[in-house]
């Protein structure tokens, strides 16, 4: 009896300790609600009630800044979600796709090939943005293992408090406000920017010693291809029409060849900027690195037509239930757009992006 | 594998579970495997060094033991036929053989330590002399210094000397002896255990005992708190001050001394708490290595309360043997004849004291800093001893010995004196250290401390807040320990208070610990000795 009582006491203490640590973990983890919004992207997918998308995008900022799912819906009745994150590496993309397929089977998966240029993890911050938002799963564990830099520890991804514990001295009102519930910052994964910063000069591309895309990247590209084929999904490889970082012709040829060998559609949008109608004086917010809303909508209109025709995606705007869901999304999209325009008019810049900006 | 690494915590968890799942008679074997597994993380060459030491010491001790047994049975068998002179002659013969084994093994064990630890130090000194005479220089050896070699060598030497002295019989099972030398919790920073104290505990099985396990875990947590919340948080301050002596002089030297005192205390006692706690979970009681040393009222008392097992080791295996050695007895006789009884009797004692402190210094590190550190400690102790009659007269005259404020003064004085000597650990050489001592008297920059300069030492406001709270808790615990074990006291309190304390301690380590990316992952300071 005494033993049981002791065991019960210990169990209660353990539960209370875990609860305290869980609460502290929530408090200490960055919220990404008012700054560095990119950190909030991955987790937003799990908030979607209706995970039934025709198209899933995977990749880096060249997908989540350059394609607008609301435009694809408005123009073609295509439902889509962007599972993008800042400097998402190809193994991140693969495991994200693997995990996404546990929830749904899209008809088309779109992968932006810029990340083929990275054959090893780059920065802990990007790993965190790609991985912290994923719920615990085998795919997440494998992705962590593939992504970690030397100084990173596996256990800190399972218990992020071990990584973020020192944030106690930097806690802000945002951390308490979003302790239990976070707002959505994207529109089906699209991170909207309406500001404009025209292209003035294009940095000279530096010569590389070796233009061969690495074996490890091909290995993951093979895995993505195989996974799509196994699930009857059409894989589309794209290169977004952003003019920097430079996309070398040598890389382009290798991807073209890969697409041909594997019977995949590959579109390098850099070759079709005139057809798309992109004006680099008005359609980019950072001088050519990313498109702004105007550019993203143009690109989405162009791309939507291609995939609808090529893969016979049906126009689902007649589906009443879906239309209701997307009407809410459209309203939020419009609201955000107006909010950003108002902010620009008032301040001359967007608050969320004013404090920093780096290549992602 | 650092004590503060995630791998070590996982290793401990697995070991604790396995230890109580397997039959008791195999527990020592599991500990042996675990100890070598743990040590193998420091490199296979290090495993080779410790294995050689174990094998050499084991065979020498067994041989000495066999000679002892042979002697016993010979004397027993020939009890009636041997005269007193025969017995004496036979015993001397045996002792002489035993001594050969002892000396060969001591030379071997200490030789490994000396070669690995001191060769480059000797080369550097030889080169300094060569430079003076414009002669060629020797190149340094590329040898790694095995983690914990000073500790396991001393433990082996202590065992061998005790067997030679007939204190106990040698351990026959080489595996069990190997465990005594390599027992992982104490392998890298002590405490330095004695075989008669630890051996039987290691080899007898232990049943799961909730109290031992719970007390052990509490002790481990307390050790982590001191290491991660206090020692590693104050470390940048110590480094900034002592690694930039041109910038940080005057008052900063004093701040550096106090910071380093706090860091070393929290680091070393924290490490020992973890060590003793791990052993406690395994049902093994290790010797305490500290008894609130910063409450000492004199240097001699401080050294009886700081790194106790090292102090007693030097006393038993260096000071006593040196004091009664032939040359020392001759010196004693000579000095009594030459300088009279009063001074003459002091000469051998002080000579032995100097030898012990020189050895203590060089044991801590192969550099002149540590040698000077040891000799300064020696100087303070000897001078204090010489002034003892004056102190006694002064205390009686002014009747202050029992006054609280005077005791506080004594504690403060000892703390500052020890801190001043200890800072030799940190500066790059003896000359710089003495220059910094000098700057405390020549450079008056106290005002800088109040102009925000303290925030430029690598410790920010939040760090100071954590440090202040952490140090207050550490002092409060030490004060409370004077009247008995904190864990005993806590276990007598209500469940809510008790568990709140444990959970609070655990959560504090997780949140306020200086670990992970952004912090240097630091070895315990004594791992390097």
Image (cartoon, coloured by chain):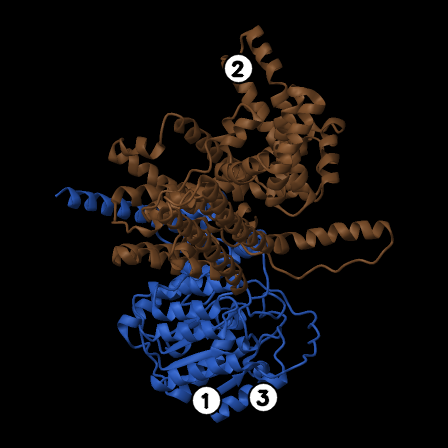
* Number of numbered discs visible in the structure rendering: 3
Kindly identify which residue carries mark 1. Answer: A264
Tell me the tag on residue A253: 3
Colour in which chain A is shown?
Answer: blue
Is B406 situated left or right of A70 in this image?
right
Viewer-proximal residue among B28 and B200: B200
Mark carried by residue A31: none
| Mark 2 touches mark 1? (CB < 8 Å) | no
Q: Provide the chain ID for the residue under circle 2.
A: B
- Say which colour chain B has: brown
Residue count near mark 2 (Cα–Cα under 10 Å), binned few <14, some 14–19, many ≥20: few
- Residue with the mark numbered 2: B405
Q: Name the residue rendered at 45%, 32% in the picture.
A: B291
Distance from the alpha carbon under mark 1 to that under mark 3: 14 Å
Q: Are marks 3 and 2 on the same chain?
A: no
Q: Chain of mark 3?
A: A
Outermost front residue: B81
Q: Secondary structure at mark 1?
A: loop
At a point 62% along the width and 56% down the height, the residue shown is: B116
């Amino acid at each position: 009896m005494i033993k049981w009582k002791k065991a019960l006491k210990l169990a209660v203490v353990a539960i209370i300790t875990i609860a305290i640590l869980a609460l502290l973990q929530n408090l200490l983890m960055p919220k990404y609600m008012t700054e560095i919004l990119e950190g909030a992207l991955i987790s937003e997918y799990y908030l979607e009630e209706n995970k039934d998308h025709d198209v899933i995008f995977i990749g880096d900022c060249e997908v989540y800044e350059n394609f607008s799912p609301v435009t694809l819906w408005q123009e073609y009745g295509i439902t889509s979600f962007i599972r993008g994150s800042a400097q998402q590496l190809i193994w991140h993309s693969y495991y994200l796709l693997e995990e996404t397929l546990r929830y749904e089977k899209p008809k088309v998966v779109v992968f932006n090939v810029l990340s083929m240029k990275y054959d090893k993890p780059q920065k802990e911050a990007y790993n965190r943005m790609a991985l912290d938002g994923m719920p615990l799963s085998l795919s997440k564990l494998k992705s962590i293992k593939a992504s970690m830099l030397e100084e990173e520890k596996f256990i800190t991804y399972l218990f992020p408090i071990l990584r973020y514990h020192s944030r106690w001295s930097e806690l802000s009102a945002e951390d308490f406000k979003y302790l239990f519930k976070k707002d959505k910052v994207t529109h089906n994964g699209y991170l909207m920017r309406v500001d404009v910063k025209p292209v003035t000069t294009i940095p000279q591309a530096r010569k590389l010693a070796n233009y061969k895309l690495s074996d490890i990247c091909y290995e993951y590209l093979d895995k993505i291809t195989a996974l799509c084929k196994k699930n009857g999904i059409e894989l589309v490889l794209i290169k977004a029409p952003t003019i920097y970082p430079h996309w070398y012709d040598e890389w382009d040829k290798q991807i073209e060849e890969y697409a041909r060998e594997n019977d995949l559609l590959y579109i390098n949008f850099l070759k079709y900027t005139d057809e798309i109608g992109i004006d680099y004086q008005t359609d980019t917010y950072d001088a050519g690195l990313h498109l702004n809303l105007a550019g993203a909508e143009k690109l989405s209109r162009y791309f939507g037509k291609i995939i609808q025709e090529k893969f016979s995606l049906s126009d689902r705007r007649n589906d009443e239930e879906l239309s209701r869901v997307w009407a809410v999304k459209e309203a939020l999209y419009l609201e955000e757009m107006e909010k950003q325009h108002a902010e620009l008019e008032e301040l001359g810049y967007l608050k969320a992006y004013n404090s920093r900006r780096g290549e992602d | 594998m650092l004590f503060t690494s995630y791998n070590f915590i996982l290793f401990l968890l697995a070991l604790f579970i396995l230890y109580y799942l397997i039959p008791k008679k195999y527990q020592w074997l599991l500990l042996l495997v675990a100890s070598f597994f743990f040590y193998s993380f420091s490199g296979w060459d290090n495993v080779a060094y410790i294995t050689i030491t174990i094998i050499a010491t084991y065979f020498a001790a067994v041989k000495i033991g066999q000679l002892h047994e042979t002697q016993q049975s010979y004397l027993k068998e020939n009890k009636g036929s041997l005269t007193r002179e025969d017995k004496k002659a036979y015993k001397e013969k045996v002792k002489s053989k035993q001594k050969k084994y002892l000396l060969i093994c001591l030379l071997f064990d200490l030789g490994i330590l000396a070669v690995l630890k001191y060769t480059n130090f000797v080369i550097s000194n030889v080169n300094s002399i060569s430079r003076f005479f414009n002669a060629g220089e020797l190149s340094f050896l590329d040898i790694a210094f095995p983690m914990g070699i000073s500790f396991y060598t001393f433990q082996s030497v202590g065992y061998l000397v005790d067997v030679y002295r007939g204190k106990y019989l040698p351990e026959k099972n080489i595996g069990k002896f190997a465990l005594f030398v390599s027992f992982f919790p104490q392998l890298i920073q002590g405490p330095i255990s004695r075989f008669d104290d630890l051996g039987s505990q290691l080899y007898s099985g232990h049943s799961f005992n909730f109290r031992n396990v719970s007390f052990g875990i509490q002790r481990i947590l307390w050790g982590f708190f001191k290491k991660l919340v206090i020692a590693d948080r104050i470390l940048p301050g110590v480094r900034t001050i002592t690694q930039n002596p041109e910038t940080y002089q005057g008052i900063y030297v004093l701040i550096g001394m106090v910071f380093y005192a706090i860091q070393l205390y929290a680091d070393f006692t924290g490490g020992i708490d973890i060590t003793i706690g791990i052993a406690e979970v395994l049902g093994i009681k290790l010797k305490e290595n500290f008894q609130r040393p910063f409450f000492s009222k004199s240097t001699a008392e401080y050294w009886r309360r700081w790194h106790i097992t090292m102090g007693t080791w030097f006393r038993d295996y260096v000071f006593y043997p040196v004091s009664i050695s032939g040359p020392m007895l001759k010196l004693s006789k000579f000095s009594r004849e030459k300088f009279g009884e009063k001074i003459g009797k002091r000469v051998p004692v002080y000579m032995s004291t100097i030898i012990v402190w020189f050895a203590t210094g060089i044991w801590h590190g192969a550099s002149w800093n540590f040698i000077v550190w040891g000799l300064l400690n020696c100087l303070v102790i000897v001078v204090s001893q010489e002034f003892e009659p004056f102190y006694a007269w002064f205390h009686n005259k002014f009747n202050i010995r029992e006054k609280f404020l005077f005791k506080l003064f004594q504690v403060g004085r000892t703390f500052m004196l020890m801190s001043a000597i200890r800072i030799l650990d940190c500066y790059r050489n003896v000359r710089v250290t003495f220059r910094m001592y000098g700057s405390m008297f020549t450079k008056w920059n106290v005002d800088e401390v109040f102009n925000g300069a303290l925030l430029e030492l690598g410790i920010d406001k939040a760090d100071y807040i954590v440090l202040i709270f952490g140090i207050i808790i550490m002092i409060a615990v030490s004060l409370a320990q004077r009247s008995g074990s904190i864990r005993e006291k806590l276990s007598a309190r209500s469940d809510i208070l008790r568990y709140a304390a444990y959970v609070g301690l655990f959560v504090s380590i997780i949140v306020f610990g200086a670990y992970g990316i952004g912090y240097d992952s630091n070895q315990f300071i004594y791992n390097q000795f």
